Image (cartoon, helix red, strand yellow):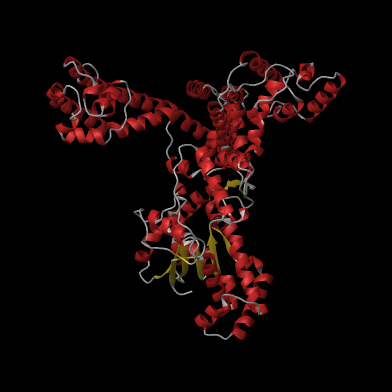
Amino acid sequence: MGKVKILKASAGSGKTYRLAYEYIRSVIDSPQLYRHILAVTFTNKATEEMKQRIVGELNALANGSPSGYMGDLERDLGLDGQTIRRRAADARTKILHDYSRFTVLTIDKFFQRIIRSFIKELGIDLNFNLELQTDSILDSATDRLIDRIAVDRALRDWVLHFVEEKIDTDGRWDIRGEISQLGRELFGERYRAVSGEKASREELSRIVSAAVARSRRIENEMKKISRWAEALAVIDSAGLAAENFAYGRGGCVGYFVKTADGTIAPYGKRVLDALESEEKWVTARSSRKEAARSVVPTLRRLLAKLCSIYDDNIRFLNTARLLSANYRSFALLDDLSEKVAEICTEQNLVPISETNAILGKLMGDNDAPFIYEKVGNTFSRFMIDEFQDIDALQYELMEVLCGYHGNLFIVGDPDQTIYTWRGADMRFLLDFDKAFPDTRTIMMLENYRSTPEVIAVANSLIEKNRQRIPKDLCACRTQHGPTVWHHAKTSDDEAKWIAEGVRALHDGGIRYRDMAVLYRAHYASRPVEEAFLKAEIPHAVYSGVPFYGRKEIKDSLAYLRLVAYQDDLSFMRVANAPKRNLGQRRMAFLKDYAEAHACSLFQALEDEIFKRTKAKQLVALVRKFRGSFEGRPVSEVLAALINESGYEQALRTEGSQERLDNVAELKQSIYEFENSCGEEVTLPFPCGAAHQCRCAR
């Protein structure tokens, strides 16, 4: 493997092939080495792919099957093919018979191993359980915090104020769901980064009150400069208006107007130009140029003063705004954190999100030789994948473990960094050769995945990054047609353009199965699917469900049908979405009752057995919409219906942003249909209507 080797591998350049080769070369050179190689990846998928590649290639070599590695192994190791095959068989047997020592694993799992090695030093119970799923801990902690509200007056008052603020902001609030959703932050990197010495609720309130008061004084001063007392008064007294100056309300005078109205916002290039030159205030086409020029010196002075106040105070204003919006949430997080800690102590649990913090304490409390003696002496060679996504603690641990043998092989590409949100720092890769001067660097620039046109676009785009290793990829695949960029006005226009392009390619002899449409998020598939259906283009949705087959879309449309028809199919779909305490026993009774009385399931809800459930709320909701939304646009009915039913709030509580995006896309598609169809689109409220709303298909 060499002493220290860095492989700077771009996407599609054969990184997995090379990683597996380095491992295989080591065990062919010395079959016993498999026990002393640690290969670290970032995902379970990458781990399994790596293991399968290594074992598969060793098996191919041992059996004499064709292998792309044979030539390279003969060259690098100076061995003949027969010797390589014999050693491959030996290594394969040793690995399969001692599989637990075949150490290819994710960095999180490796951290777990280290924690178990230092249980005594960390003061962790010997029988601790590493909790991979934090939802159960969070649910129990939320329940305990809610129970505490009943007996803790200070906490109750704090939560009541929190509720009032949330209602003012969102119009709705679910105390348990909101606390539970908030609690997810406890297991994220951001909370641990800012959680330190805790301030009391009283201290937080005092700090926020002082910050808000100061921010109001600053904003009032900025308004005063802009209002009729100064800048706008100068303009008004000269008999002028914003339209007499360059760009009207979109120019520097418009900045006075916005600030006077209470909008404290960044100023742009036009304001900067006006500060630098009086000529930028008035254009040749401006009406009353001379009168406008006469007040420019005064206005320019006031604008400079206004911008100076903004520059001096914007960081504080933003901080005060964030404090005011989030300080109650942060205090509740501390309370919830205490309950989480209680549960973990009682049940000997260690959330997986805490492993970094535990290892940080370990690294701070012990010297490097001690850590290496306990963990590192098992391994003499280290391989680390996706090095651009390593964080400071992981880098420090890597230095400790490989500091003795120095056999290190890393793979990374700063252009592919995706974990900066959890502390990843690409500078560890960018500056690696400075920390390890004897590093041998291998650049992998040949791309086996994409065509020259795609590679050319990628090169031209990624070269704009400032923090990167300069490189140009070259494509190994054959050339195809040019890369085409199209900017459509709407998503439907874009989808139509895609469908036309697919049809044109098919007419030119390309099979449908050889074409693919990639989209950024699942909700974006809707217009493409509809365009393909209209164009009668056969297609399949991979790695997901077709838009109108997704649960949240079916649920939303079922609510519309329930209001319109009160049919059993729609009722069964949304009766417990969100949950309404209609369990299997009650639903079975409801079906029997409806069958015996020859009525619908919805009508059967009038029975006494359902008085203790939230079913009555569903009945009231449907009656309200049948009585007050008749003749209203479907988009308006749907938006109000999924809001008042609690369905949308339930998705927020679950943290299902993708599902919320899909519901938003459904509402948007209905709205666009209403605006384009040229006729009124409403729900068929009258019973027995012969036609169905076209949107609720």
User: What is the number of callouts on the image?
Assistant: 0
The residue drawn where x is 85% and y is 19% is 598
Q: Nearer the viewer, residue 524 or 388?
A: 524
**In this rendering, does residue 638 appear at all?**
yes
Q: Nearer the viewer, residue 123 or 607?
A: 607
What residue occupies the far right of the structure in this picture? 596
Report the side of 503 relative to 237 (left or right). right
**In this rendering, does residue 187 appear at all?**
no
**Residue 397: horizontal and vertical position, in percent?**
46, 59
What residue occupies the far front of the structure in this picture? 507
What residue occupies the far top of the structure in this picture? 627
**Residue 317: horizontal and vertical position, in percent?**
32, 30
**Residue 48: horizontal and vertical position, in percent?**
61, 61
The C terminus appears in which quarter of the rendering?
Answer: top right
Placement of 56 over or under 288, stated as above or below: below
Report the side of 248 relative to 114 (left or right). left
Placement of 427 over or under 189, stated as above or below: below
The residue drawn where x is 44% and y is 60% is 367
Q: Nearer the viewer, residue 615 or 163?
A: 615
Residue 679: quarter of image: top right
Residue 282: quarter of image: top left
**Residue 440: horizontal and vertical position, in percent?**
40, 72
Q: Nearer the viewer, residue 479 or 249?
A: 479
